């Protein structure tokens, strides 16, 4: 990303068209053995996914090891080394730092994932951190990956943590457009930024579909929808953290091109990427607001359902109380003649009413009066 130096061609993108892109599935990291002349026993695997040299937009050599790449780069003037790593070891990054004079702070960041998206310049080397994303259909969730880039005068180093993005597709795209690749590391940086931003589009479509399903579940009364809203909200927070810094990063990158004499055409390409990134950011912001509104509506519907259930319980309790009142009233009415009959049914010798000629009518009338009085009282109180 530095200005033109003696003996080095100028790299620009003037008058070039943006080639078509293909995104086949990314192959798994390959196990690369060290060369036979490496000291000590060879490791079981290497983090080097691909290492190649390009000259005038065409691949001139492919290497399985970093050492071979370094030797060929020194022997080939005006060439570009594009090295792809997946979760490199500390020693591998130290080897790269020694060869390409990488800053210690950038190397430390590249060793650790979970960095925020950022752009830092260390002398003639640009260090870029990107958060890529892809939508997984089966679990209906967003998978995030992290990509670290070192972009220098004659090299591009990519350090990938996670499954996204598909850098093999980016490499095939660039090799299929030598007129673009021959303009050097800046063109590779643009292609990677474009791939990362374009990779957000399927995620946006997947999230939009999830939100539509959630709206249906909310109004359908699905009790599990609250958990799904919460999980999707967390994914959108991560998505915002991945996309929001891109606009500032691209603006800073474009502004720096003025100082370092980078071609105007590249700025146009990057402005196109910035427009896509801004559109994605606005969509994600809209999704978060929509989820917040859906959560509010869901809470309202849940409260309404709870209120309806409470009303139903209250009505059932009221009806039950009314039935209890009726039962209690009739029990009291029936208890009165039972009490009178029980008293006179004891048949004690010294009970005057037993030998009284009017005793029986008196007892019947007394029971009738008591029952009638209780019925009138309960009726006035609404118990009957």
Image (cartoon, grey):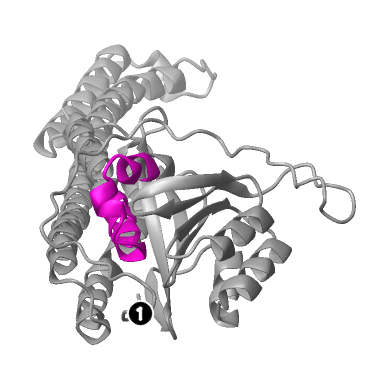
Asked which secondary structure carries label 1, the reply is loop
* Residue at the disc numbered 1: 2
Q: Would residue 227 be visible to someone looking at this image?
A: no
Q: Is residue 296 magenta?
A: no
Residue 167 position, x and y percent, is 41, 46
User: What stretch of residues is rendered in magenta?
Assistant: 171-197
Quarter holding the N terminus? bottom left
Residue 283 position, x and y percent, is 15, 54
Q: Is residue 188 magenta?
A: yes
Quarter holding the C terminus? top left
Q: Is residue 313 above or below residue 36?
A: above
Could you classify mark 1 by the number of other residues whose Cα lies within 10 Å: few (under 14), some (14-19), or many (20 or more)? Answer: some
Is 297 left, or right, of 164 in this rendering? left
Is 46 left, or right, of 288 in this rendering? right
Front in this rendered view, residue 191 or 57 = 57
**Residue shown at 22%/66% (left/top)?**
12
Q: Main secondary structure of the magenta part?
A: helix
* Occupied quadrant, residue 44: top right
Front in this rendered view, residue 362 or 220 = 220
Is 143 left, or right, of 359 in this rendering? right
Residue 374 position, x and y percent, is 21, 31
Tally of marks: 1
**Residue shown at 34%/54% (left/top)?**
56
Front in this rendered view, residue 56 or 25 = 56
Q: Residue furthest right?
A: 40
Is 341 left, or right, of 203 in this rendering? right
Q: Would residue 44 be visible to someone looking at this image?
A: yes
* Occupied quadrant, residue 166: top left
Residue 262 position, x and y percent, is 23, 75
**Residue shown at 13%/59% (left/top)?**
272
């Amino acid at each position: 990303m530095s200005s033109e130096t003696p003996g080095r061609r100028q790299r620009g993108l003037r008058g070039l068209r943006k080639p078509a892109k293909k995104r086949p599935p990314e192959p798994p990291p390959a196990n690369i053995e060290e060369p036979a002349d490496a000291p000590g026993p060879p490791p079981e695997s290497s983090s080097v996914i691909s290492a190649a040299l390009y000259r005038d937009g065409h691949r001139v050599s492919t290497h399985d090891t970093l050492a071979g790449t370094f030797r060929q780069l020194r022997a080939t003037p005006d060439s570009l080394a594009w090295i792809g790593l997946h979760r490199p070891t500390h020693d591998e990054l130290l080897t790269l730092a020694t060869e390409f004079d990488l800053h210690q702070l950038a190397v430390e960041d590249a060793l650790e994932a979970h960095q925020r998206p950022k752009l830092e310049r260390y002398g003639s080397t640009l260090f870029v951190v990107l958060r890529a994303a892809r939508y997984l259909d089966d679990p209906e969730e967003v998978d995030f990956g992290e990509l670290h880039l070192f972009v220098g005068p004659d090299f591009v180093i990519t350090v990938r943590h996670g499954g996204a993005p598909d850098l093999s597709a980016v490499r095939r795209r660039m090799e299929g457009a030598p007129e673009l690749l021959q303009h050097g590391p800046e063109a590779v940086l643009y292609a990677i930024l474009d791939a990362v931003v374009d990779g957000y589009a399927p995620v946006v479509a997947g999230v939009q579909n999830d939100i539509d399903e959630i709206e249906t579940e909310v109004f359908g009364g699905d009790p599990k929808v609250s958990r799904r809203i919460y999980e999707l909200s967390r994914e959108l927070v991560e998505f915002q953290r991945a996309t929001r810094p891109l606009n500032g990063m691209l603006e800073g990158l474009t502004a720096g091109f003025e100082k370092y004499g980078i071609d105007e055409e590249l700025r146009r390409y990057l402005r196109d990427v910035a427009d896509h990134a801004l559109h994605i950011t606005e969509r994600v912001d809209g999704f978060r607001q929509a989820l917040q509104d859906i959560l509010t509506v869901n809470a309202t519907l849940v409260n309404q359902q709870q209120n309806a259930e409470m009303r139903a319980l209250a009505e059932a309790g009221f009806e039950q109380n009314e039935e209890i009142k009726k039962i209690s009233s009739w029990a009291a009415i029936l208890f009165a003649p039972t009490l009178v009959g029980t008293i006179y049914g004891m048949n004690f010798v010294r009970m005057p009413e037993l030998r009284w000629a009017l005793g029986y009518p008196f007892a019947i009338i007394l029971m009738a009066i008591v029952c009638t009085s209780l019925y009138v009282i309960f009726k006035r109180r609404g118990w009957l």
